[in-house]
Image: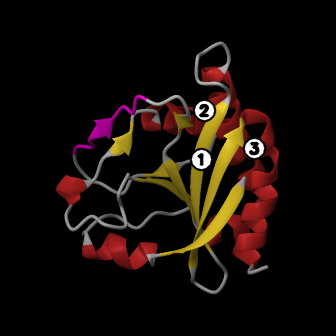
Amino acid sequence: MIEVTDYLNVREKITRLELSQPEGIAFLPRGFEKANSVNELVYESETPTIRSLLRQEGIPVSRLEKDKINFKEEQSIAFIAPILFITSQLITQNPALLDVIVGVVSNYVYDVIKGTRRNDKVKLEYVVETTTGQYKKLTYEGTAEGMKEIPKTIKEIHDGQ
């Protein structure tokens, strides 16, 4: 199931928290929308691995924090991936890169849940900056197989459809 909802202005929140503005893609920490300080920011434990896999494909990932990053491992029957923020600039300048990004994440998720007790259950979230400067959150919950629709939906969100 894919659900699309409005999301807060990511760039304004980044400025308020005195973080670095991302180019292309970045990971958003858990609870980003409610955080009042950098000390409250915590990332999913899978963040460094997915960042490394994206870099291996030549995709630079922006870091919001200048200093230490906190991670939290979630004990869940579902695989919970870090929230990926995709800027309008990335989609506009290189739309084919979006398929690579989602493919890298999807392949990693599939490999992780294969042979585990996670029941092929996946939860992914993407925050997309639209061409009009709005922000939308795409939440996917379902099987690893169903992740194929995510790139198309992200492009539609970006284009305001």
The image quadrant of residue 148 is: top right
Assign a secondary structure to mark 1.
strand
Q: Which mark is residue 56?
A: 2
- Tell me if 142 is positioned left or right of 86 in this view: right
Residue 74 on the magenta span: yes
Q: Picture coordinates of residue 47 (x, y %)? A: 45, 38
Residue 137 on the magenta span: no
Amino acid on which disc 1 is placed = Leu
Q: Mark 2 or mark 1: which comes first in sequence?
A: 2
Amino acid on which disc 3 is placed = Met
- Tell me if 16 is positioned left or right of 83 in this view: left
**Mark 3, residue position:** 147
Q: Mark 3 or mark 2: which comes first in sequence?
A: 2
Q: Residue at x 60, y 32 (%)?
A: 56
- Tell me if 99 is positioned left or right of 120 in this view: right
Give the magenta-colored segment's residue range. 68-75
Amino acid on which disc 2 is placed = Gln
Q: Picture coordinates of residue 70 (x, y %)? A: 26, 41
